[in-house]
Image (cartoon, rainbow, N blue to C red):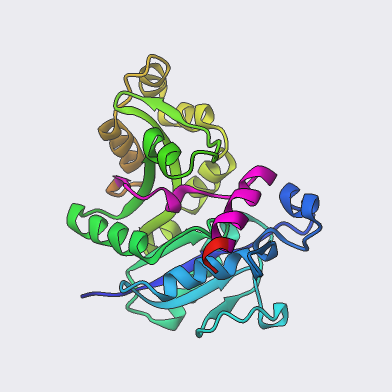
Amino acid sequence: MKTYPALVLGGYSPDKPDPLALAVGAERKSLIDVAGKPMIYWVVKALAESERVDSITIVGLSPEDKVDFGVPVNYVPNQSTHIDNILAGVKALQQQNTDTSFAVVVSADIPLLQSRSVDWFVDACEKKGGDFFYSIVEQQVMETQYPNSARSFVPIAEGRFCGGDLFFVDVHVAVGNEELVRDLLDRRKNVFQQVRLAGIGTLIKFLFRRLTLQDAEKVGSRLVNCEARVIVSPYADLAMDVDKPHQLDMVRQLLGATA
């Protein structure tokens, strides 16, 4: 069974503090307390328990943060922007192992992530084949597993979905499409802006809810000049990011009951 490095995105903007961190009096979002541990601890725990991950690199933290993960991790200093954090992380992976091709990339704000979800996702990506894999979760799955999640969903032909925070990426794709990735990340919170970037035909389909998952894959492939694939996950934890106080309360309750 092949294993891969994992990259945890825990970066932050020194000039624009995260609203949730400010609301709870935390220094940074990744360090918000969740069941007695920093939020990022739970993400690293899931990766460490995964059969498909062989190393963990964290962007945006350092040994000075004194987080005891209980497993070896590599650190990459925080950069000025989100895309710069991603690129710095990718370059660090390549420096650690020049043969690095694919990596598991995950946000630091999904503390409910489970190792089984990571294993399933990587397995699904390998079976489907491609260069860039993006996880999504159907509305019914999310609301069944986490009834109080209050996530936002995007309507397409196959149903309503929310985006996940777990990716499987050919590291050369990010390095080779830096400016486009910057543009996509600038628009990442605005689905309409992302669809506009894809072209008028895609925009019309989206507006009339005729955009399909296959359309999304074709658009993604064209935009980043690679084979982009969408993976529909049966596990909602990989998409349960914590952005709002009620979501933080929910994950604290769930992890507090199992910690």
Residue at 74 percent of width and 54 percent of height: 21
Q: Position of residue 4 (x, y in %)?
A: 34, 73
On the question of residue 165 being in view, the answer is no
Q: Is residue 183 left or right of 49 when viewed as pictured?
A: right
The answer to whether residue 65 is above or below residue 80 is below
The magenta-colored residue range is: 229-256
Residue farthest to the left?
127
**Callout count:** 0
Looking at this view, is 122 or 110 the one in front? 110
Q: Is residue 2 left or right of 197 when viewed as pictured?
A: left
Residue 128 counted in the magenta span: no
Residue at 49 percent of width and 33 percent of height: 194
Looking at this view, is 235 or 147 the one in front? 147
Looking at this view, is 85 or 163 the one in front? 163
Which quadrant of the view contains residue 221?
A: top left
Residue farthest to the front?
257
